[in-house]
Amino acid sequence: MNLGDDALQPIEFVYFDLGNVLAAFDVDRACRNVAVRWNVDPALVRQTLWHSGIQDKFEHGHLDDEAFAAIARQGLGLGLDAAPTMELLNQLSDMFEPVAEMEHVVDEVRRSGTKLGILSNTCIAHWRWIHQSNYPALQGPFDQVILSYEIGVMKPDCEIYRNAQASAGVDAAAILFLDDRVDNVEAALACGWQAHLFTDAKSASELLRYCGVFK
């Protein structure tokens, strides 16, 4: 288990990543959605939005819905009338599926009395889509929800971890974090958190028991 030197310190707060922890996502699906709806090359969609860094700016909160959609339309050769902003954003956001097994894990943490939250790199369009989809594992309450687009910084930048720790109101070593990316886990460990690479709900549950969050 990827735990820091303070692994035995009692856990007071658990942060879950969103993508591929609480909700699986597939960028290729988003590209296909746009390709089918507007008859464009899915490779062009990926290049225009992901490879160009525009999605990254959206997740940093540097672009709002309209600015992001305008750049997307320009790169894809689409007009506003043909591709209204919300329709375009919804086609791009329709790439998530709930990780059903995590509902039980999240509920167990909540029932244990341990505070919990979400710490995610995401954009406003994706968060809105997921929030409206009512995925079971994302039904609140969460004590804190830290989203990159709201605070202008993304994992693995240490600033987002400092922000999340301040919001949690506990010592760094009292936070347990589960994320599916090695670089994000390593950054959390460097910030003094306890952290673990998420692989599946069963392993997450075992980790939480090991750390004494629940029995």
Image: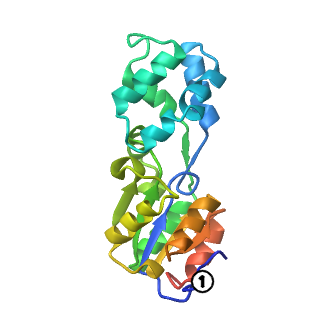
In the rendered picture of this protein, how many numbered marks are placed on residues?
1
Q: Residue at x 62, y 26 (%)?
A: 32
Q: Nearer the viewer, residue 206 or 127?
A: 127
Q: Is residue 141 visible?
A: no
Q: Is residue 8 above or below residue 193?
A: below
Q: Position of residue 88 (x, y in %)?
A: 45, 24
Question: In the rendered view, how is the structure colored?
Answer: rainbow
**Residue 64 position (above or below residue 141):** above
Query: Mark 1 belongs to which amino acid?
Result: Tyr
Residue 69: x percent and y percent?
41, 25
Residue 212: x %, y % from top left: 52, 85
Residue displayed at 61% across by 27% down: 47
Q: What kind of element bears circle 1?
A: helix
* Residue drawn 64% across the image and 33% down it: 28
- Residue 100 versus residue 39 in the image, above or below: below
Q: Is residue 184 left or right of residue 70?
A: right
Q: Quadrant of the C terminus?
A: bottom right
Which one is in front, 58 or 1? Answer: 58
Front in this rendered view, residue 54 or 213: 54
Q: Quadrant of residue 114?
A: bottom left
Give the residue number, with chain letter if any, for mark 1: 210
From the viewer's perspective, is residue 5 above or below residue 185? below
Q: Give neighbour class at mark 1: few <14, some 14-19, many 20+ (Cα, 10 Å).
A: some
Q: Hey, which quadrant is residue 206 in on the image? A: bottom right
Q: Residue at x 62, y 64 (%)?
A: 198
Is residue 150 something that shows in the picture?
yes
Q: Position of residue 199 (x, y in %)?
A: 66, 62
The quadrant of the picture occupied by the N terminus is bottom right
